[in-house]
Image: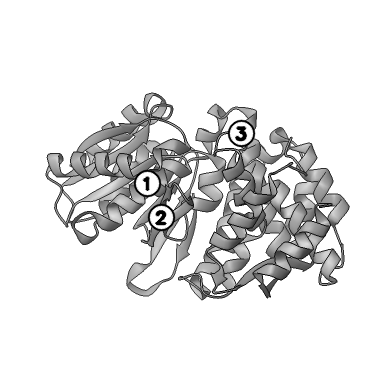
Amino acid sequence: MKTLHVGLDDRSYDIHIAPGLLSQAGALCRAALPRAGRLAVVTDSHVGPLYGETIMSSLAGAGFQAELVTIPAGESSKCLSMLGRLYDAFTAQGLTRSDGVVALGGGVVGDLAGFAAATILRGVDFVQIPTTLLAQVDSSVGGKVAIDLPAGKNLAGAFWQPRLVLMDPACLRTLDDKTFSDGMAEVIKYGCIRDRAFFDFLCAHSSRTAVMEHIESVLYTCCDIKRQVVEEDERDTGVRMILNFGHTVGHAFEKAGGYETWTHGQAVAAGMVAAERLGAALGVSDGDGFSELLEVLSAFGLPTHIDCDWSAIVEAVGLDKKGDGEAITMIFLSHMGKALPMKMKKEDVLQNLAHVCGR
């Protein structure tokens, strides 16, 4: 088993990575939550039938009174009404502040269940058991939890660190190719922003089969990069912003498609390319590795360009959480493997994006 420790004083926790870890969830949760009697296990309609029984059996074996709460699969569940359903389920179960919430699923489940855990009873302990590649390398680590609002993605949220993160790479075998590729966008992002050698490794192993042969090391590398960034900047006021490379324009792509046409990974992939083109136009990106970025994204079936209504881009830039008044922090690459945050006026971002997008 590979283990990473995220050091955040009294909010510290371990990330465990190993095949077959789901069957050990009970013992590991008991060690992380020694006072808990009840656990609410939140999952979705896709993941529950696959892994719910294994998790519930393991938790029962560790002495927990656990109840399964199943939500519909999909981004549309990350909403206020579904949050209310979780509150109702938690209170009906009789959760107290010494109990906890377990998120079993992908990013939607983790974000929604985490936000519910952060806000019910002013906060209860929370365990992440991510089952998609995207959730394992990104959303399950770092403590960002949120729901979507009609105005945009992740606009109501909190920083609420999990007490434990359990990653079972065997869960990835049940993903379809599109969902696996979705996660690869974030995997590739880590190489772009912080680790050129890792980026080169991905270029040389640009297929699902090749990545899965090294999946524990891939997960460890991604989570280790995120661990370093989160330990340095837990509240997303400085260096942590580099994790949003490709996300500003990417969120516009997602919203323009009603969060259904384009997945998060597809939007981020095209967003990274747009950011690189913008950086080159501004003279802050040297273009090193750009052709390889296009190739590796394409190899995993990810788009390098998305046609998007211009008004959606204007709105996304205006609502971006890295914004500060009339300014916004854009994330570029000075060169491959080195992220470059740059504060710009929103009007300048839009003017240059318009040029890059051929408007």
Q: Position of residue 6 (x, y in %)?
A: 45, 65
Q: Residue at x 38, y 67 (%)?
A: 12
Instruction: Pick whichever, 184 or 212, lies toward us.
Output: 184
Q: CA distance from mark 2 to mark 3?
A: 23 Å
Q: Residue 133: give x, y in percent of width and height.
A: 56, 42
Instruction: Name the residue beneath numbered marker 2.
Output: 145
Q: Earlier in the sequence, mark 2 or mark 3?
A: 2
- Count of number-bearing discs: 3
Q: Tag 3, which secondary structure?
A: loop
Residue 129 visible from this viewpoint: yes
Q: Which mark is residue 112?
A: 1
Q: Amino acid at mark 3?
A: Thr
Measure the alpha-carbon separation of dots 2 and 1.
7 Å
- Say whether marks 2 and 1 touch (CB < 8 Å): yes
Disc number for residue 102: none
Could you tell me the amino acid type at mark 2? Val
- Res 261 label: 3
